[in-house]
Image (tube, rainbow, N blue to C red):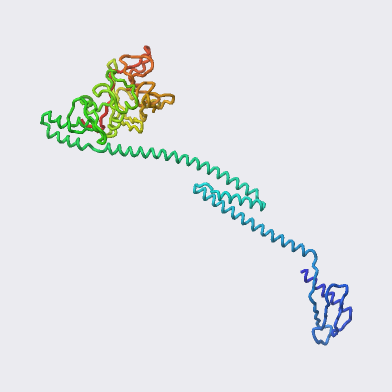
Amino acid sequence: MKLVYVCCSLLITVWQEVEASGSGPSGVLDRVSASSSCPQLRLKPAGQCEDEEECPYQIQIPPLTIQLPKQFRLLEKTMKELQSLKETVNGLKSSCLECSLQQVDLNLQKDSGDPPTNSAEESRGDTSKRVYQNGNDSDNSINVQQMQVKMNRMSSSLKNARVQINSLQGRLEELNLLNLQNVEDIVDRKVENITGMVNKISSTCTANCPGQQQLQHLSKFTARDCSDISVLGQRTNGVYQMTPDPRNDSFPVYCEMESFGSGWTVLQRRINGSVSFNRTWADYKNGFGNPKGEFWLGNDKIHLLTKTKDMILRIELEDFEGTRGYAKYEQFYVANEFLRYRLSVSGYSGTAGNALQFSKHFNHDQKFFTTPDRDNDMYPSGNCGAYYGSGWWFDACMSANLNGKYYKAKYKGKRDGIFWGSWHNLTSEYYPTNYRQTFKNVKMMIRPKNYAP
């Protein structure tokens, strides 16, 4: 609009000069202004016409140099600033897009459980610098701090997860070993003694044979425990060779054939105190004493016997007053040495009381075997086996200990003798005499649960 205004002003000025000169339509105006910077102007009629007032005129303007007002210079400067502002806005848009992409990468890394890589950290640092240069350092600084907090939490969680994974791997290895052992135990227990069944059938055909022939046949028979011999009709107490596992050697055991339904394999017996039970881990592992007198069969042998079949445990006790009692457990198992001969016992019945599972704080079930030289008990301040001078499945420390010292009369002081915590007169043990209860005869024996005499 300013340009049109200038042109119109110029035309009006020319027209005023034409009229002032009084030239006619056929004349030519030649005027040069020495004081003006504008070039010559020529004005002439457009053609022949009768009425000079209606005759059109043409004006020829040579190339002009027009000086514009200073506002046009401000307009140019404003346009340049506008272009610069546009470029700045585009830069900010690019920065925001990169921030969004990096946030998506961080979210993906968080979902996958992997910590951010170094390149991601460097990229995030470069982005924060760019945003700071563009004037948005406040919001971006907050985002960077939030991401750093999240990274620290993720790093801490990852460390905890690694510790838990290592712990679980250790437990998994142990469980795998236990599972293999359990599978082996189940297979061994479920395998039927085919040889024993065949010999049982054969015995019905040779019932009228002389006793000497039966004994010869019995000498060739391989028994897993005393119940196999009882099934063949042999009902005499004594020492017999047993092979619970064909992969291991045979060993002698004492069989109780004349009492309690026959077929019992004796694990331990105390009758006169002739054998010391204050022994080492190796002694309890292999066994000691005389099967015909006082003895401990041996933890390795007890393990082989209890893993072959599901066994019942029967404990017989008699004190020096002639009082007798028994404790029977429907489930009894002793693990191998790797598991420290851990005891599994349950299903009590009897007259002596359940001393093996006396209370929550005194429970021998699921406890490891401890000896004076091998501390596996639950007592945190010492060795129960060393204190009481015996090997046993101590808790912290005991409500039962059938391997304690054999006292032939009541005694005072430390309770290191044979002990059964649920015995009938235990409450009168301290008063008025303050003497300890003693036992004359003790016997531990097992028999298969499915045994039928």
Q: Nearer the viewer, residue 337 or 406?
A: 337
Q: Nearer the viewer, residue 57 or 388?
A: 388
Question: Residue 29, located in which quarter of the rendered image?
Answer: bottom right
Question: Residue 32, located in which quarter of the rendered image?
Answer: bottom right
**Residue that extends furthest to the right in the rendered view of this protein:** 21
Residue 394 lies, in percent from the top left, at 37, 26
Q: Nearer the viewer, residue 208 or 21?
A: 208
Residue 197 lies, in percent from the top left, at 19, 36
The answer to whether 200 appears left or right of 168 in the picture is: left
**Residue that extends furthest to the top in the rendered view of this protein:** 433
Where is 375 relative to 157, above or below?
A: above
> In the rendered view of the protein, which quadrant contains the C terminus?
top left
Question: Residue 409, located in which quarter of the rendered image?
Answer: top left
Where is 408 relative to 118, above or below?
A: above
The answer to whether 149 appears left or right of 198 in the picture is: right
Q: Nearer the viewer, residue 257 or 298?
A: 298
The answer to whether 317 appears left or right of 198 in the picture is: right
Q: Is residue 41 visible?
A: yes
